[in-house]
Image (cartoon, rainbow, N blue to C red):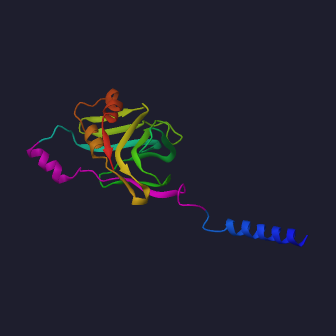
Amino acid sequence: MKKIKIYLLASVMILISSCGGDGGTTTGNPIMVKMEFAAFNNSIAKMISNWFIPEAHASLSSLKMCLKRVRFKVLDSSAGNDIELELGEIEIKPEGTPLGNIEIANTTYRRIEFDLANDCDGTTKPSVTINNSNGTFTTNDGLTIKFEGEFTPSAGDLTLFIQNIVDQVKNYQISDGEIKAQLEAVSGTY
């Protein structure tokens, strides 16, 4: 009987000591990452240089997107990890646009996609609104903008370079019916 008590006591002590620690492993625990759209070049200096050497783009007054969800595509897989966003309609600002903090698994990602929809914040708004020197254009189409590159959360914050997308919406030929095709035809980087 004494041997059984000692055996039970030893088993309980081993069980209790194995339950302690830091609350988990580092493999699989999510990491908090600060996301933002980088600044884009919409400066007065660029506008003045375009007066002397025009580029084939109109000037952009404002760009609003209704962000519904973000999808992180893992390097070794075509599957993505969808994360619902609660950002709603945001204005993409020339000086950069903070998107907030998001928890993601600590692995390497090859692509990040944002789904845009006209019902992103509980109300109906256009999924994209573009105001450039040619007028104001909107779409209610659901669409996806993508960012290509390689990113590991442990490497730091996630800055998404949106210049290619901004250049696409400044295009002189844009119309309401072409917005989805125009935006899905280009990629940002990170």
Which residue is at 38% across, 39% downward? 145
Front position in the image: 17 or 178: 17
View extreme (right): residue = 1
Q: Is residue 47 left or right of residue 1?
A: left
Quadrant of residue 54 in the image? top left
Q: The N terminus appears in which quarter of the rendering?
A: bottom right
Instruction: Tell me: residue 88, above or below residue 102.
Output: above
Which residue is at 53% across, 57% downward? 27
Which residue is at 13% across, 45% downward? 50
Front position in the image: 33 or 162: 33
Image spot of residue 100 (x, y percent): 45, 55
Question: Residue 84 magenta-drawn?
Answer: no
Question: Residue 28 magenta-drawn?
Answer: yes
Image spot of residue 77 (x, y percent): 45, 40
Front position in the image: 81 or 26: 26
Which residue is at 33% across, 35% downward? 183
Residue 170 appears in view: yes
Q: Is residue 185 left or right of residue 9?
A: left
Quadrant of residue 122 in the image? top right
Image spot of residue 66 (x, y percent): 43, 41
Quadrant of residue 22 in the image? bottom right
From which residue to which does the magenta span run?
Answer: 24-53
Residue 156 appears in view: no
